[in-house]
C-alpha cells in the first residue's frame, strides 16, 4: 500500500540515496535548491512511500508560471529528461497516478513529464516527439571512442591538436569569462540566458558533481568557449547541459576540441557515457552530434491538462517570431530582460 506525501527536509538523505541509485544527479535535492534559489519556483516535490514509510519513488515537480502566466508543474525544468525514479514497477505506476492527482490538488493548468527510457500508457497525455538526446559510449581507450566518429570529424580533432591553437582548463574561476561567452552565444541563437547566479549555484550546492571545462586561446589566454559538465555516478553518465563558444573560432574547430576534451574528462573519471544534450530532429546540432557516433535517443515530452485544453509549453516553431526579435534587439536589453524572462519559459 502506497501513499504520496510532500517533500520535507527530513527526507533528504533517503531521497538522495534513491535518486543517485535509480535516477540521476538531476533528481537530487541539491538540484532542487539550485532551481528554487535561482528562480523562486515553488517546490512540488513529492515522495511515494510504503506502509513502513520508506521512499519507493520520487516525483521532482517544480511549480511555476509559464509565458501565459498559468500555474504549471514540470518535472524537471532546465533538464532535458528526467525519467520517474522508482525502485519497482508498482511504485512507478503509483507515481504516475499521483502526478495526475497532484495536477488537481495543486491547481495546475498542466503537468509536463520529460522521459527518455520510460513511456506512459493511457489517454489524456499529449506527446511531443521533436527532441532527441545523444549518448556517446566511452571506453578506456580514447582511440576506440574516436573511431566511432565520422572520418571528417576525426580529421578535425587531429588537426586542432596538431595546430596547438587551444588549451583546456578545469578551473572554476573562469566562470565569469565563460558566462560572457555563453550570454553572447545565446543571443545569437535567439534565446535568453539565466543570471550567472544560476551557474554559480551548481558549484555551491553540487560541488562533487560539477565541473567547468573552459577553452582558452593559446596565444591570448582569453576564454573562447566552455562547458558546464555534471557527473552522475548512479548511471555513470557525464552530462553536458550548458556550453558555448565564440563563433569566430569555428574555422579552428573549437567545438571539436571542446567536445573531445569532455570525452577525455569522462574517461579519466571512469564514466561510461557522455550525454551530449538535446537537439531537435534534423537540426544543425543534431547532425553535428551524429558525427561523433553518439546514439540519438528519443525524448518523450508528455503533457497532461485534464482534458481542459489548457495548452502545453510552446514549441520552437511557435516562438519563431520571438526568437528573431531577440536576435535583433540590442544586447543591453536582452542581457537584462533575459534573466527575468527565462524562468517563465521553463526550458
Image (cartoon, rainbow, N blue to C red):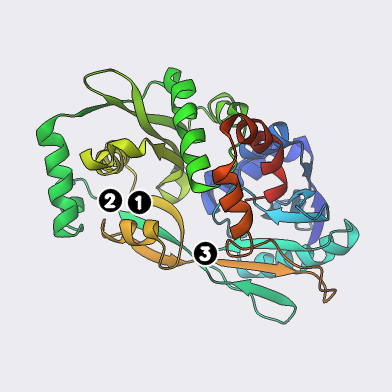
Q: CA distance from mark 1 to mark 3?
A: 15 Å
Residue placed under numbered mark 2 in the picture: 138
Q: Earlier in the sequence, mark 2 or mark 3?
A: 3
Q: Decide which of 129, 216 is in the foreground and name it.
A: 216
Residue 102 appears in the figure: yes
- Quick check: 186 left or right of 161? right
Where is 276 relative to 1, above or below? above
Relative image position of residue 257 (x, y in whole percent): 25, 39
Disc 2 packing (10 Å; few <14; some 14–19; many ≥20): many
**Residue 240 occupies which quadrant of the picture?**
top left
Q: Which residue is mark 1?
A: 273
How far is the residue under mark 2 from the one under mark 1?
5 Å
Please tell me the numbered disc located at residue 116. Answer: 3
Q: Residue at x 26, y 25 (%)?
A: 217
Label 1's element? Answer: strand
Q: Earlier in the sequence, mark 1 or mark 3?
A: 3
CA–CA distance between discs 2 and 3?
Answer: 20 Å
Compared to residue 108, the image places residue 127 above or below, namely: below
Q: Are marks 2 and 1 in contact (CB under 8 Å)?
A: yes
Amino acid at each position: 500500500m502506497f501513499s504520496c506525501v510532500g517533500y520535507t527536509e527530513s527526507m533528504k538523505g533517503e531521497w538522495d540515496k534513491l535518486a543517485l541509485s535509480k535516477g540521476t544527479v538531476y533528481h537530487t535535492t541539491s538540484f532542487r535548491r539550485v532551481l528554487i534559489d535561482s528562480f523562486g519556483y515553488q517546490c512540488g516535490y513529492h515522495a511515494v512511500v510504503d506502509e513502513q514509510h520508506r521512499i519507493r519513488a520520487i516525483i521532482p515537480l517544480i511549480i511555476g508560471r509559464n509565458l501565459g502566466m498559468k500555474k504549471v508543474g514540470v518535472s524537471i525544468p532546465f533538464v532535458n529528461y528526467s525519467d520517474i525514479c522508482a525502485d519497482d514497477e508498482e511504485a512507478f505506476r503509483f507515481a504516475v497516478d499521483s502526478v495526475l492527482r497532484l495536477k488537481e490538488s495543486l491547481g495546475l493548468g498542466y503537468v509536463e513529464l520529460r522521459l527518455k527510457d520510460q513511456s506512459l500508457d493511457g489517454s489524456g497525455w499529449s506527446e511531443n516527439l521533436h527532441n532527441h538526446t545523444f549518448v556517446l559510449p566511452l571506453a578506456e581507450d580514447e582511440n576506440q571512442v574516436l573511431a566511432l566518429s565520422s572520418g571528417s570529424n576525426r580529421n578535425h580533432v587531429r588537426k586542432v591538436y596538431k595546430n596547438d591553437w587551444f588549451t583546456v582548463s578545469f578551473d572554476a574561476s573562469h566562470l565569469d569569462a565563460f558566462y560572457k561567452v555563453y550570454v553572447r552565444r545565446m543571443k545569437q541563437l535567439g534565446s535568453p540566458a539565466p543570471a550567472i547566479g544560476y551557474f554559480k549555484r551548481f558549484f555551491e550546492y553540487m560541488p562533487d558533481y560539477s565541473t567547468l571545462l573552459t577553452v582558452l586561446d593559446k596565444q591570448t589566454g582569453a576564454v573562447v568557449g566552455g562547458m558546464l559538465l555534471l557527473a552522475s555516478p548512479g548511471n555513470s553518465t557525464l552530462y553536458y547541459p550548458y556550453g558555448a563558444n565564440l563563433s569566430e573560432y569555428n574555422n579552428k574547430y573549437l567545438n571539436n576540441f571542446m567536445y573531445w576534451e569532455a570525452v577525455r574528462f569522462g574517461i579519466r573519471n571512469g564514466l561510461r557515457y557522455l550525454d551530449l544534450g538535446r537537439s531537435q530532429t534534423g537540426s544543425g546540432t543534431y547532425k553535428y552530434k551524429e558525427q561523433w557516433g553518439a546514439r540519438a535517443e528519443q525524448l518523450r515530452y508528455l503533457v497532461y491538462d485534464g482534458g481542459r485544453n489548457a495548452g502545453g509549453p510552446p514549441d520552437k516553431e511557435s516562438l519563431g517570431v520571438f526568437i528573431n526579435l531577440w536576435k535583433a534587439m540590442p544586447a543591453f536589453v536582452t542581457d537584462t530582460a533575459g534573466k527575468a524572462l527565462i524562468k517563465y519559459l521553463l526550458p
